[in-house]
Amino acid sequence: MTQQQSRSWQDVAETGRGDIPEGLWTRCPRCSVMLYKQNLVQNLMVCPECDHHQRIGADERATQLCDPNSFEPMWEALEPVDALTFSDLKPYKDRLVGEQKKTGHKDAVVCGKGFVKGRSVALACMDNRFMMGSMGSVVGEKITRTIELGIEEDMAVVVVSCSGGARMQESALSLMQMAKSSAALARPDDAGGLFISVLTDPTTGGVTASFAMLGDIILAEPDALIGFAGPRVIANTVRQELPEGFQRSEHLLAKGFIDRVVHRKDLRSEISRLIDYAGK
């Protein structure tokens, strides 16, 4: 931390005045330490004090994983529709407009192609900022197209999951995406392709129950929440006391559900190494 940064924070702490620009500082949600935002960004949004991996958007994820200026977004014009005229606290069509303005994207996934340390990949990054990364018809379609792109251009397919599951506002249309994306993965499997699934916090619901757990290699970030139903639902169903952290990536690694827990700073190297190992 520079002397100027330290002085700015000390002034606020002593005087209570907001004389520094808003957004320069943020608090770690785990250890509650105040962090200088620029330092946090340079550390890939990982807390330098407690190593907590904070959630990041799809654009930031693609930038972190891909070589500089190599990622090419595709199918950006695909947009969800309110086929069921669904309304909960507010109409689904109005909710979509709000989420699109907030994120700058049509839906909860950014897909395209790029290079990871010189290795070409078809990449899909889910965006938790858009309705908690829930999977509707457009998300399922774009992920399916990413899988097909990997087959057509003989590239490894990398999908970074960050989702609350299927999107209830699209009902059965959303649930159909589970079968659609899972069936699409049979093609690279038959063609000898490579699918690397990266699980981040959280990966839950219908995403976990479909493509997220079908990777040839399944990686996860540290302490990521991964599961289908919530712990209370499971506990009430099985009527047993569940071990602490049983839905976290480290526990799933110990039980053989995932292949490796990888720190965010090492993801690029790990993905490129796996691509080389698989001969892709």
Image (cartoon, grey):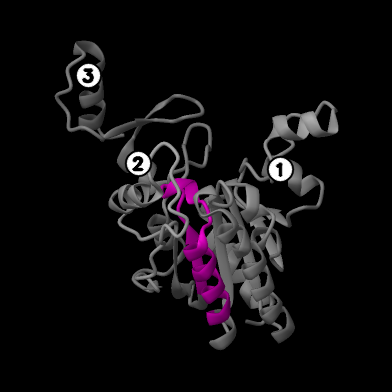
Q: Quadrant of the N terminus?
A: top left
Pair 1/3: label in front: 1
Mark earlier in primary sequence (3, 2)? 3
Label 1 – label 2 distance at C-alpha: 27 Å
Inspect the magenta stretch and tell me whether residue 173 lies in it: no
**127 is higher (above) or lower (below) than 197:** above
Inspect the magenta stretch and tell me whether residue 128 lies in it: yes
Residue placed at 47% from the left, 65% from the top?
138
Please give the residue where the numbered disc 3 appears in the rendered image.
Answer: 12
Residue placed at 40% from the left, 73% from the top?
75
The answer, for residue 243, to whether it is visible in the render is no
Q: Position of residue 268 (x, y in %)?
A: 53, 63
Label 1 – label 3 distance at C-alpha: 39 Å
Callout 3: SS? helix
Q: Quadrant of the C terminus?
A: bottom right
Mark earlier in primary sequence (1, 3)? 3
Label 3 – label 2 distance at C-alpha: 19 Å
Residue 34 lies left or right of residue 204; in this view the side is left
Image disc number at residue 39: 2
Mark earlier in primary sequence (1, 2)? 2
Residue placed at 43% from the left, 62% from the top?
62
- Please give the range of residues in magenta: 122-149
Residue placed at 20% from the left, 18% from the top?
11
Residue 119 lies left or right of residue 182; in this view the side is left
**91 is higher (above) or lower (below) than 189:** above
Residue 16 lies left or right of residue 204; in this view the side is left
Image disc number at residue 250: 1
| Quadrant position of residue 157 | bottom right
